[in-house]
Image (cartoon, rainbow, N blue to C red):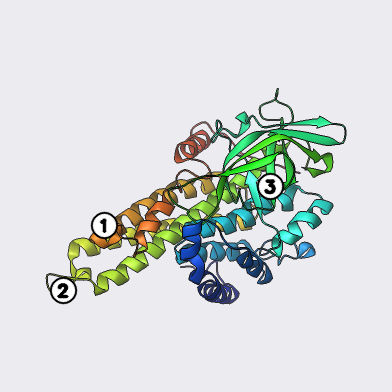
Amino acid sequence: MTNNYFTEEHHSFRKSFQEFLQKEVVPHIDKWEKTGKIERFIWKKFGEMGYFGLVYPEKYGGLELDLFYTVIFLEELQKINSGGFAAAMWAHNYLAMTHLNIEANHELKEKYLTPSINGKKIGCLCITEPFGGSDVAGMRTTAVKKDANYIINGSKTFITNGIYSDYLIVAAKTDPTNKYKGISIFVMNRDTKGISATKLDKLGWRASDTAEIAFDNVIIPASNLMGNENEGFGYLMQHFALERLIMAINAHARAEFALDYTIQYMSERKAFGTTINKFQALRHNVAEMASEIAMCKEFNYSVANKLNNKVYAVKEATMSKLLSTKMADKVIYDCLQLFGGYGYMEDYPLARLLRDSRIGPIGGGTSEILKEVIAKIIMDKKEYQKPIY
């Protein structure tokens, strides 16, 4: 079923990445989950192996590979049972770095994108605000031009890598009178005066650092503007299809991991004189879960193929995230049930999986917002055209 999308080179990459994760990452996961801090050495190892450069230009140290290497990268990160570690990696790789790659000029790419690819710098993307949520256009953070600088004031929240990143990609209002045409995108160093961050305590994703960030008269050079002033809303919308697909792939991969682990457990756990994988009611539950995973997985691959071929698949990517994250929550909930009391114990992976999965229908656009986006497309005939920059 997957041969339409994956070549022998893809399969070789998957195997080598699996081995890398087992050797370099898995031994540290429990520590990072407890401390909430991922040590810097692993970022450098990811960079040395080229994992942060899969889709980026060779000119800046990337590999310029197709999007299905990213699919593999995302899937395998979900199979080491740390949604927080996975989030830290892909938020750097596909949120912060995507904006650098598309909007930044050559000088900014050399300064930020190249060291991001080689793992020497970590980035975060700052869009969501305490009072804004999914209302991107309603953001209150401002950037006022003064001479050769911008002065940034405001706050952002729920920012992955918001504590330990080296630079921030920040969306701010440069024209507060214009809701959609008044946003601009900036890059700034973490140590810039006036930037402060507070670590948030989360239900899941314990290994990653999530922050609320405040900007108090932060002065940055006008040259740190990425792209054109007041065109930031279009830049943000341009990347939402990829972000939603990422969340969808994460969802089907963690559901698949949960089910595979559960099937193995069922083959070993005995009750009433036989292993529980022989009970028809439980077998049929597994069959249903496997079917739901396969349907989402195949659809997600088809959306990835569209994006890989430069199709601006907003509707399909939105549907992917909506259904896949809902499916993953249900599958993981049901898998935990099959473990009985052991599913509730931290010694088994289902407890962490359940916590980590719950962010799926919230992050990157809530399910409620996504339903309205889809409704506008299919009922109001709204068309989302890919911006040309």
Image side of residue 358 versus residue 287, left or right: right
- Rendered location of residue 261, percent (x, y): 35, 68
Secondary element at image label 1: helix
- Front residue of 187/278: it is 187
Local crowd size for mark 1, using a 10 Å CA cut-off: few (<14), some (14–19), many (≥20): some
Where is 216 relative to 310, above or below? above
List the residue tagged with mark 2.
274
How packed is label 3: few (under 14 Cα within 10 Å), some, or many (20 or more)? Answer: many
Left or right of 278? Residue 96 is right
Tell me the residue that label 3 is attached to.
168
Residue 273 disc label: none
Kindly tell me whether residue 89 is visible in this rendering.
yes
Between marks 1 and 3 in the image, the one whose residue lies nearer the viewer:
3
Say which amino acid is labelled 3. Leu
Residue tagged 1? 337
Q: Residue furthest right?
A: 147
Q: Locate the C terminus and report the quarter of the image it occupies.
A: top right
